[in-house]
């Protein structure tokens, strides 16, 4: 069971940009899936400008954006390539030619390695660590399960990911030192959602003490927060009539960015303050907007 912070309809909802730095997101507003920047003044700018490809921004760091690109290249199955974008110049550089099976991945605290998922011949997914050339430096899983949607903890010690290794799809934690697995979620009510489970992806907070993740409950998606290790959690309040909330990430000051669709419409970008319970709209739904991220401090 997940505790809702405030009753639906009672949450404080604010409107208009209320950000101190740039936010990056993915949108098909130009006809192709591309990466955009939302400035504190509310201006939207296309950063990739490449037709014929699909681009998904996964994370923002000081001076670079990590994006996943599917440009139609054949790697045996649907796959993405890792690229870095300079947000000031728009220059794009590919990190090797390793085709990955996921649009989710985490970066090590030193910025030199990434954890992601690769296809196997039996169509399952293994978690691997790759360096900035795309070379595999470690395999975290080699088993009969689908292991995807990974994120790396800020202290560099743990990986959170989505897996069916417990019989149903849930969130799991992998300890890089002990190589031990710990199950974080267990909700039989959403095990069969879309055949891929109703938990995840998850993101670590800047201090590593919490997770924000997608949770399927009562026929719709919510964004929930969990205190670690596997403590009490809350879900972001939704308006009367429900909504679909997705793709959370964290701001440096501990707020949560996410996308929201109401009535099956296009997605707006919002920010949630866990302390006050307020939800602020940063960008309206026009254009359909996904996966907001902002760089950490430093």
Image (spheres, grey):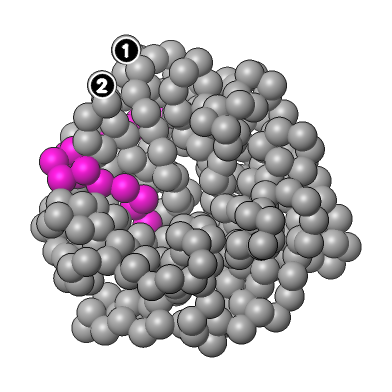
Q: Residue at x 67, y 68 (%)?
A: 128
The quarter of the picture where the N terminus appears is top right
> In the image, 225: left or right of 22?
right
The reply to whether the magenta stretch includes residue 237 is no
Q: Position of residue 169 (x, y in %)?
A: 66, 37
Which residue is label 2 attached to? Answer: 263
- Bin the neighbour count of mark 1 within 10 Å (Cα to Cα): few under 14, some 14-19, many 20 and up: few
Q: Residue 153 appears at what percent x and percent y?
A: 64, 60
Relative horizontal placement of residue 182, taking residue 108 as reference (left or right): right
* Residue name at image x 22 percent, y 66 percent: 52
From this viewpoint, is residue 162 visible? yes
Determine the secondary structure under disc 2.
loop
Is 218 located above or below residue 117 in the figure? above
Residue 286 belongs to the span the image colors magenta: yes
Location of residue 184 in the rendering, given as x and y in whole percent from the top left corner: 72, 39
Q: CA distance from mark 1 to mark 2?
A: 8 Å
Mark 1 vs 2: CB contact within 8 A: yes
Q: Residue at x 73, y 75 (%)?
A: 138
Q: Secondary structure at mark 1?
A: loop
Q: Nearer the viewer, mark 1 or mark 2?
A: 2
Crowding at mark 2 (Cα within 10 Å: few <14, some 14-19, many 20+): few
Q: Position of residue 12 (x, y in %)?
A: 31, 24
**Left or right, residue 267 beside residue 169:** left
Q: 136 or 185, which lies in front?
A: 136
Question: 183 above or below 114?
Answer: above
The dot on residue 241 is 1
Instruction: Examine the rendered structure and indicate whether residue 184 appears above or below residue 278.
Output: below
- Per the rendered image, the range of residues in magenta is 277-296
């Amino acid at each position: 069971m997940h505790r809702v912070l405030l009753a639906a309809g009672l949450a404080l909802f604010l409107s208009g940009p209320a950000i101190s730095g740039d936010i990056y997101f993915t949108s098909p507003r130009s006809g192709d899936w591309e990466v955009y920047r939302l400035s504190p003044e509310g201006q939207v700018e296309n950063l990739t400008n490449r037709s014929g490809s699909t681009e998904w921004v996964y994370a923002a760091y000081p001076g670079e954006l990590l994006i996943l690109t599917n440009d139609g290249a054949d790697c045996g199955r649907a796959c993405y390539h890792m690229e870095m974008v300079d947000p000031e110049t728009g220059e794009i550089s590919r990190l090797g030619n390793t085709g990955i099976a996921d649009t989710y991945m985490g970066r090590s605290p030193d910025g030199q390695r990434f954890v992601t998922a690769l296809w196997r011949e039996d169509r399952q997914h293994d978690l691997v660590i790759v360096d900035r050339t795309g070379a595999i430096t470690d395999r975290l899983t080699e088993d009969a399960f689908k292991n995807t949607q990974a994120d790396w903890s800020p202290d560099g010690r743990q990986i959170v990911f989505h897996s069916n290794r417990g019989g149903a799809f849930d969130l799991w934690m992998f300890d890089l030192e002990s190589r031990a697995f710990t199950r974080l979620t267990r909700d039989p009510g959403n095990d069969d959602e879309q055949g891929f489970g109703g938990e995840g992806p998850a993101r670590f907070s800047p201090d590593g003490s919490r997770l924000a993740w997608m949770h399927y409950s009562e026929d719709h998606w919510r964004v929930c927060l969990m205190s670690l290790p596997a403590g009490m959690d809350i879900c972001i309040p939704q308006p009367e009539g429900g909504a679909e909330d997705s793709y959370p990430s964290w701001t440096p000051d501990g707020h949560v960015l996410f996308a929201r669709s109401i009535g099956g419409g296009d997605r707006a970008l919002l920010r949630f303050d866990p302390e006050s319970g307020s939800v602020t709209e940063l960008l309206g739904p026009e254009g359909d907007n996904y996966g907001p991220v902002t760089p950490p401090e430093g």
